[in-house]
Amino acid sequence: MEIKWYGVYRWYGQDCIFDLPRDLLNKQGVYLWTIPFEGRYLTYYVGETHRFAQRFNGHLRDYQSGVYRVYDPQRFAQGDAKTPIWGGTWKRDRRDPKYKLEFTRDYEKWSMIIHDFLGHMRIFLAPFETDEHTRMRLEASVVAHLQAQGKLMMEQDSIADTLKTGARCSNESPISITMVCAEPILGFPKSLVI
């Protein structure tokens, strides 16, 4: 099976993800969030979805409302995802209303930082019409491949969950996949067995 990766897209401005043709945005598949890094792209996040448009709308909403963690934009652009400046409210220990209040009190400041942070990201999409578990297998396999190579992927917030939920079950047959991407993504596999 061959999977083609499309990109490079952005959250806003030129090549905006939301300007893509509806038929592509309505597809299911796997996606990468990356940053330009030393003439290539360094992966920050790998995700899967049953519909790109819906998932990206949700991601953007969660960034803009303070749900997601935000990293120092300048350090993030240099490949450092270990310097959070906003902890988000998605984790159990940050669901107290005081954190939402803290975010909304300084919303103007946070919105500018989030805009800057998202501006560094570059997005790739791989339409993959299949069931959810098989998409999760591909997602987990890409994460595992990048992680196995050391520093070729930034620290993703939900890596343990991704690897656990996307593991191939013992009763499932392996699937060989050829990956086609025109852009140079650090450590990106040319093929995988998921």
Image: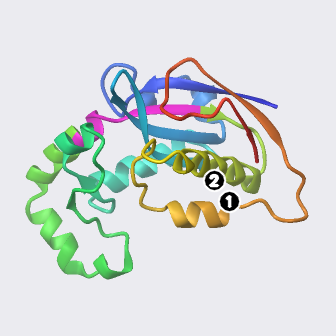
Q: Viewer-proximal residue, 94 or 56?
A: 94
102 above or below 55?
below
Residue 133 at what x, y percent from top left? 74, 57
Magenta stretch, residue numbers: 117-125
Residue 106, disc: none
In screen coordinates, is 102 left or right of 151? Answer: left
Specify the color scheme. Answer: rainbow
Please check the rendered image and state whether residue 76 is part of the magenta-colored stretch, yes or no.
Answer: no
In screen coordinates, is 117 left or right of 27? Answer: left
- Please give the name of the residue rendered at 13% of the width and 56% of the height, measured from the top-left corner: 107
- Please give the name of the residue rendered at 23% of the width and 79% of the height, measured from the top-left corner: 97
The residue pinned by badge 2 equals: 140
| The quarter of the displayed image where residue 178 is located | top right
The residue pinned by badge 1 equals: 166
Name the kind of residue labelled 2 in the image. Answer: Ala
Residue 154 at what x, y percent from top left? 39, 48
- Please give the name of the residue rendered at 32% of the width and 63% of the height, measured from the top-left corner: 67
| Dots 2, 1 in contact, CB < 8 A | yes
Quick one: SS at disc 2? Answer: helix
59 above or below 10?
below
Residue 111 visible to the viewer: yes
Number of marks drawn: 2
Distance Cα–Cα, label 2 vs label 1: 5 Å
In screen coordinates, is 87 left or right of 174? Answer: left
Mark 2 / mark 1, whichever is N-terminal: 2
Residue 27 at what x, y percent from top left? 65, 36
Q: Viewer-proximal residue, 194 or 17?
A: 194
- Please give the name of the residue rendered at 54% of the width and 66% of the height, measured from the top-left corner: 160
Residue 161 at what x, y percent from top left? 56, 66
